[in-house]
Image: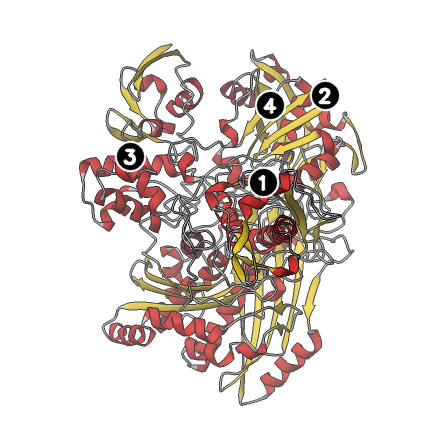
């Protein structure tokens, strides 16, 4: 079947099998490989991206379900003005090590800050509780999101 | 507490030397531009999928692949029988169905005669699409004849137990190592037995005995194992992109397994999404992708799914330990004896130095001063997945630290003594270093009491005990758990440490280009450790070149010198030392070039960071950048001095490094539900010199989360039929941000005396040190119920059962 969706502002049309998962579609058909796959069971959140402004786990969404919708991935975070404050926060606070969970974490973090610009530590922890990181023990991820909340416009700090 | 050296700052704002520096790697990762194995796509690439056994133990009477082969898109289906038919021109067997393990055992690439664990590789489908490959798995008919599975290590020892390794002509389930030994002992058996017997007979002494299970867990990196293999039939060149913590060692193993010439094999380990020991072993999937490209002539990608990762790749622990600790009633430890039954699964696939078949478990005497210690480890085969040394365990020091730290806490309970006081009475003293332990380790340096008192200061230990007493009086159950650990990391001295005969030394190469920019080529492999940043800092520290002017190359056997890779916290102790040594070689050569340029004797020069200058005439000198250009130019060099500015070295560590630390965990337990809440976690680590404190602290944070996970949630258990009960993240529970507290870190700095920059490995310290702190805290919390010990994981159900006084067997789903 043919699907058309807007990915990071660009209209994409592809023929896909109806059973194809959105995560595979984005990685293999759209060739945006920043969205990762980690568990198959919606537990790890490495595949988190946005569909119509909501953070979703793309391993449990079919590409066909995203037909006609807006998809935003980690590749869409950086703008001409520079890195998103969330991306900068992860660098500033050492919020990543192996980098595999990072795109999904950042997509959730951006969603959180768009809906709650000044979250408490508890609210941040709850927001990312559907995602697993094996490297950082979460402390620096929490601090990275707090940093982004404290620096809503950070293009001037981008090296 | 620590003297932070003032270092100059580079034009890009980085420390020219040690200190916090933002990571070079992050620039690509935050943009989603990392390059992991599943991101590698080649023209014409095919996709492989593995059919796995649903049985833990079964005879294979036949496999029918015809329906799978007929499915459009399927290119080939490999079975064990097909691999047996491919002759292998190597010393390690005559066909491809079996491969050597890292412990000189054999493991089936695809099962031939029997399957020996649930999830074992049975057939390999190669198709044009990953969905079609998975579809084809459903069409393969395997005629299994189920056999009694052996899921309990104790049952494996029974005379009438089914024989698992009949392929090797075994008549029991014992494991014989390459030296011919069936048990592995260390320490002083007679002295320890006598000391314990004397203590038992002495009314002024106590002996505490406890069975302790360290259950099977799994490292579970976020990226599963994967490979892409490409054989160029014209040149005979095999390129393998793979999730490997040790690309060079893997290349050598492939040369041995496949009989391919080693110079025609290139192993590339691109960005690796976490390892934790899961990516040390050579798995059948990697070998099958290689065989797949040889058979089809096309590149073949294999990416395991999470279930495959959990049920088939390297597990960790599975140690049944019985400990005995003897002490005086004043709390002076006299002796510790340990008997271990080690469950190695169906193939002995542990990755550890050959001469250490139980890993470094015999460092279990710990951080305390007593003369008598002894352990005996008996390994057995069971119908479980192979592995055993993984999950940031520092070659089984995790098990050792857990054992001694639980025993010391139980001794404290027996003596009705504060566990902090008991530890302080027995800790090694600074003047005892270098200290030779009762099992033969030579600890390099330590100021144990200083570190422990720092942890107690941060925790506010006395206040916590007061709070606990007040809460107990109110019927609230708060627990405080301490662990003090010592690790030996950085394997290791070549004279007695090797894996498959490959000595554990690491090569490194440093080239300074004419303009003074440098490239450093490493044998070790980052899986998130940030080597591209911290290794540049080591060179910067030695040569004064700004870190941003140093490119660190790793993860490609064609571009880097040989070495054994990254696991067992060995990068900094071995390759980090190599980076300092190779920089010093360059610096020595730079001195000769500078002397020629300045027309003076090299002896007249002295070093300041980044520059050789004339003694007594500091205006006259040459910077390392000037020297780099001179060394590539037409300057006449002294006899014997070649042009250019580069060096290589192979670092053979004289000893391990011995990082240590003191952790304090504070928990609250709900006695009604058994729910444990980790409220605080204090970690004071001493890993000697810290190259990049930010990275060190990040690794400690990650290890503390591991410890919370293992202590409270994580478990690979099996039912009686051999079904793995931890086969997905819905059953294998990993800690999230909700279960982890805001860690409180501290440090002391006691440099390693034999490491060129005084650094010690730290990557696994927190994973090793934190589980006993959590368990000690939980047991402390529920001790009013008469609980002395409870095995991990301390899930609500297990804590509740312990409170009720009901025994818990955690590793099997039986009551």
* SS of the residue under disc 4: strand
For disc 3, the chain is A
How far is disc 4 from disc 1 in space, using C-alphas?
A: 46 Å
Q: Kindly identify the residue that appears in the image at 50 percent across and 86 percent down.
A: B329
For disc 1, the chain is B
Say left or right for B790 vs A10.
right
For disc 4, the chain is B
Residue bearing mark 2: B235
Whether labels 1 and 2 share one chain: yes
Q: Kindly identify the residue that appears in the image at 22 percent across and 37 percent down.
A: A153
Say left or right for B765 vs B805.
right
Q: Is residue B409 above or below residue B581?
A: below
Residue bearing mark 4: B300
Q: Residue furthest bottom?
A: B203
Q: Which sits earlier in the primary sequence, circle 4 or circle 1?
A: 4
For disc 2, the chain is B
Is residue B256 or residue B569 the one in the foreground? B569
* SS of the residue under disc 3: loop
Residue bearing mark 1: B629
How far is disc 2 from disc 4 in space, using C-alphas?
A: 18 Å
Is residue B708 or residue B430 the one in the foreground? B430
Mark toward the viewer: 3 or 4: 3
User: Label 3 crowding class (10 Å Cα cut-off): few <14, some 14-19, many 20+?
Assistant: many
* SS of the residue under disc 1: helix
One can see residue A43 in this view = no
């Amino acid at each position: 079947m043919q699907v058309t969706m807007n990915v990071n502002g660009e209209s994409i049309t592809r023929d896909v099998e109806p059973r194809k998962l959105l995560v595979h579609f984005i990685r293999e058909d759209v060739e945006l490989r920043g969205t990762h796959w980690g568990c198959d069971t919606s537990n790890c959140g490495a595949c988190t991206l946005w569909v119509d402004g909501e953070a979703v786990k793309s391993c449990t969404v079919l590409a066909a379900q995203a037909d006609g919708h807006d998809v935003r991935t980690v590749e869409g975070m950086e703008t001409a003005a520079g890195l998103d404050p969330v991306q900068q926060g992860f660098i500033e606070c050492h919020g990543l090590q192996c980098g595999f969970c990072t795109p999904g974490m950042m997509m959730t973090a951006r969603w959180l800050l768009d809906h709650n610009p000044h979250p408490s530590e508890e609210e941040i922890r709850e927001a990312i509780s559907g995602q697993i990181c094996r490297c950082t023990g979460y402390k620096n991820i929490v601090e990275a999101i707090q940093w982004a909340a404290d620096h809503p416009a950070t293009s001037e700090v981008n090296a | 507490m620590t003297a932070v050296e003032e270092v100059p700052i580079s034009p890009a704002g980085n420390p020219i030397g040690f200190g916090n520096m933002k990571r070079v790697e992050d620039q690509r990762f935050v943009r989603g531009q990392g390059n992991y194995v599943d991101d590698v796509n080649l023209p014409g690439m095919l996709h492989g999928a593995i059919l796995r056994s649903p049985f833990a133990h079964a005879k294979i009477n036949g496999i029918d692949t015809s329906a799978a082969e007929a499915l459009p898109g399927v290119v080939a289906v490999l079975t064990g029988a097909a691999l047996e038919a491919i002759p292998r021109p190597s010393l390690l067997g005559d066909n491809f169905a079996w491969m050597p393990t890292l412990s000189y055992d054999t493991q089936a690439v695809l099962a031939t005669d029997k399957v020996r664990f649930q999830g074992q590789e049975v057939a390999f489908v190669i198709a044009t699409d990953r969905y079609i490959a998975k579809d084809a798995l459903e069409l393969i008919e395997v005629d299994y004849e189920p056999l009694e599975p052996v899921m309990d290590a104790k049952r494996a020892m029974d005379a009438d137990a089914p024989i698992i390794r009949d392929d090797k002509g075994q008549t029991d389930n014992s494991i014989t190592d390459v030296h011919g030994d069936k048990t592995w002992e260390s320490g002083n058996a007679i002295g320890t037995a006598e000391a314990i017997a004397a203590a038992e007979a002495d009314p002024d002494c106590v002996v505490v005995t406890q069975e302790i299970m360290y259950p099977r867990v799994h490292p579970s990196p976020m990226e599963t194992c994967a490979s892409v293999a490409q054989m160029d039939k014209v040149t005979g060149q095999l390129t393998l992109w793979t999730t490997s913590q040790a690309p060079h060692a893997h290349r050598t193993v492939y040369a041995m397994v496949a009989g391919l010439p080693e110079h025609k094999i290139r192993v590339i380990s691109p960005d690796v999404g976490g390892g934790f020991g899961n990516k040390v072993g050579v798995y059948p999937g990697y070998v099958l992708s290689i065989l797949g490209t040889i058979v089809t002539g096309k590149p073949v990608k294999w990416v395991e799914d999470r279930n495959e990762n959990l049920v088939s790749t390297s597990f960790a622990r599975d140690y049944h330990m019985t400990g005995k600790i003897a002490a005086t009633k004043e709390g002076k430890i006299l002796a510790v004896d340990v008997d271990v039954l080690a469950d190695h699964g169906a193939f002995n696939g542990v990755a550890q130095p050959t001469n250490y078949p139980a890993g470094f478990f015999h460092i279990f005497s710990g951080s305390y001063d007593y003369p008598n210690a002894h352990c005996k480890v008996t390994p057995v085969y069971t119908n479980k997945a192979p592995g055993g040394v993984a999950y940031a365990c520092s070659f089984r020091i995790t098990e050792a630290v857990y054992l001694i730290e639980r025993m010391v806490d139980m001794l404290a309970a027996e003596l009705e003594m504060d566990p902090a006081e008991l530890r302080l009475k027995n800790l090694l003293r600074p003047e005892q270093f270098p200290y030779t332990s009762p099992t033969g380790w030579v600890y390099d340096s330590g100021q144990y009491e200083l570190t422990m008192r720092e942890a107690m200061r941060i925790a506010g230990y006395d206040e916590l005990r007061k709070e606990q007493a007040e809460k107990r009086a109110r019927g609230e159950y708060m627990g405080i758990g301490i662990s003090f650990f010592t690790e030996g990391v950085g394997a290791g001295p070549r004279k007695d440490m090797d894996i498959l005969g490959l000595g554990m030394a690491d090569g490194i190469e440093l080239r300074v280009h004419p303009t003074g920019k440098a490239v450093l080529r490493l044998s070790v492999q980052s899986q998130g450790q940030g080597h591209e940043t911290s290794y540049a800092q080591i060179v910067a520290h030695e040569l004064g070149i700004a870190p941003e002017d140093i490119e660190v190359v790793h993860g490609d056997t064609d571009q880097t010198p040989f070495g054994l890779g990254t696991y067992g916290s060995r990068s900094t102790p071995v390759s980090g030392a190599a980076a300092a040594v190779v920089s010093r070689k360059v610096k020595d050569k730079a001195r000769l070039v500078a002397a020629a340029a300045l027309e003076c004797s090299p002896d007249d020069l002295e070093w300041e960071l980044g520059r050789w200058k004339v003694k007594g005439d500091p205006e006259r000198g040459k910077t390392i950048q000037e020297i780099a250009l001179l060394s590539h130019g037409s300057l006449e060099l002294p006899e014997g001095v070649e042009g250019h500015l580069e060096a290589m070295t192979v670092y053979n560590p004289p000893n391990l490094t011995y990082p240590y630390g003191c952790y304090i965990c504070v928990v609250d337990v709900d006695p009604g539900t058994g729910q444990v809440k980790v409220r605080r976690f204090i970690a004071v680590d001493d890993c000697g010199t810290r190259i990049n404190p930010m990275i060190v602290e990040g690794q400690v944070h990650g290890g503390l989360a591991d410890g919370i996970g293992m202590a409270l949630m994580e478990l690979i258990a099996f039912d009686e039929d051999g079904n793995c009960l931890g086969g997905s993240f819905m059953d294998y529970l990993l800690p999230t941000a909700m279960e982890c507290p805001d860690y409180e870190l501290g440090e002391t700095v006691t440099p390693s005396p034999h490491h060129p920059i005084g650094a010690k490995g730290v990557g696994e310290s927190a994973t090793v040190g934190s589980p006993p702190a959590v368990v000690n805290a939980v047991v402390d919390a529920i001790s009013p119920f008469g609980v002395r010990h409870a095995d991990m994981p301390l899930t609500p159900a297990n804590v509740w059962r312990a409170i009720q006084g009901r025994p818990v067997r955690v590793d099997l789903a039986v009551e």
